[in-house]
Image (cartoon, rainbow, N blue to C red):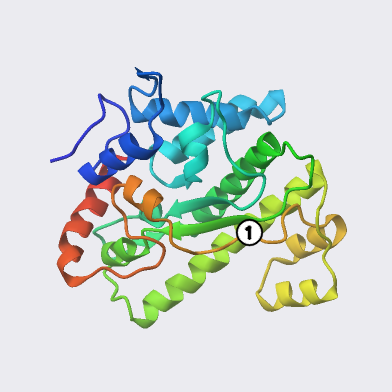
Amino acid sequence: PIAENQGGSPFVSPVAVDAWDTWFRWRENGMLHDDTVDATWRRVASTLALLEPEPGRAAFELRLLDAFASWRLLLDERLLATAGTGKDSWPDNDLVAVLNIVGFVRQRDTPDATVDLAAVKDCAELATRALDNALLLGNRSGQESKKLRIGIIGYAETLVLLGLDYCALEALRLARSLAQSLAEGCLRASVALAELRGATARCDEAWIKKARLRRTPAELVGRAEGHGLRHASLTSIGPQPRLAKFANDTSDAVLPLTTGAARSATCRAVRAVVLV
């Protein structure tokens, strides 16, 4: 059965409800502030939108809310727990975000099932900008921001939805495409933010050569060469067990499913795609 949160964004797994209630739900002095998970999404999105210029602030907040409520994007657990509570607590370096790849599967249960890589790029851009906003909000030291870590979860369930074996050549190709899309989306945001808020790193000849070898679009390389980067270090696919549990007990990073967990995980992934 599906555990729902009083009509809010549906939870597919009881583990996810427990994760939200234990780690991310806002309580203070015996008072419950986040009555639904949508309340958690709203306070985080509205806080991070404060750094956006007024004409586009509402649109940016809505983009975040949509990505959150569809479980496609989860931000650093410190942001989820404290943003908008009046007791904000996160560093001005090394913030994390993960894209849940299950949410990007299109035409599931058909021979044409695929991952929407354009949507992955767009969400990676959104994640980068959201974390840059958080860095500015948390930068009480006045120092320049440094490193972000943006990765993925839900890779194993995605392979099941696509009918791919974990070690198949097609799965390896998908992993490469996901990594390229994640990197390109993050880079686009980094360049755009450098243009808007200032660069913290310049692109030398070695960087340009490496970008071209990675088949980075020429227009993006040219913009990076001219304006620099807001963040030189962005993608990092590492373990985020709390965020994976919160995202309907999704597989962490690119870890495979065990045989015993495969069936139940597939059911959760399918239900999550249907519901959001």
Q: Residue furthest left?
A: 1
261, 119: nearer the viewer: 261
Label 1 element class = loop
Q: Is residue 150 above or below residue 178?
A: above
- The image quadrant of residue 206 is bottom right
Q: Quadrant of the C terminus?
A: top left
Task: Kindly indicate the quadrant of the structure image that contains residue 16.
Answer: top left
Q: Residue shown at 69%/79% (left/top)?
A: 213
Would residue 34 be found to the left or right of residue 275 on screen? Answer: right
Residue shown at 79% from the left, 72% from the top:
208
Question: Viewer-proximal residue, 76 or 113?
Answer: 76
Residue closest to the eye, 144 or 36: 144
Residue at 35% in and 55% down:
102
For the N terminus, the quadrant is top left
Where 188 falls versus 204 (above or below)? above
Q: What amino acid is labelled 1 in the image?
A: Leu
Residue 244 position in % (x across, y down): 36, 53
Where is residue 164 drawn, in percent x and y?
A: 29, 73
Residue 152 x %, y %: 46, 59
Relative placement, left or right, of 19 versus 2 is right
Residue 13 seen in the current view: no
Q: Which residue is mark 1?
A: 234
Q: Residue at x 53, y 35 (%)?
A: 63
Which residue is outermost to the front?
29
Task: Inspect this view and state whether residue 265 appears.
Answer: yes
Report the number of numbered marks: 1
Position of residue 139 measured from the top left corner of the image (x, y, whole percent): 71, 39
Is 25 left or right of 130, judged from the image as shown? Answer: left
Q: Characterize the local packing of mark 1: few (<14), some (14-19) or many (20 or more) Cα atoms within 10 angstroms.
A: many
Quadrant in the rendering for residue 231: bottom right
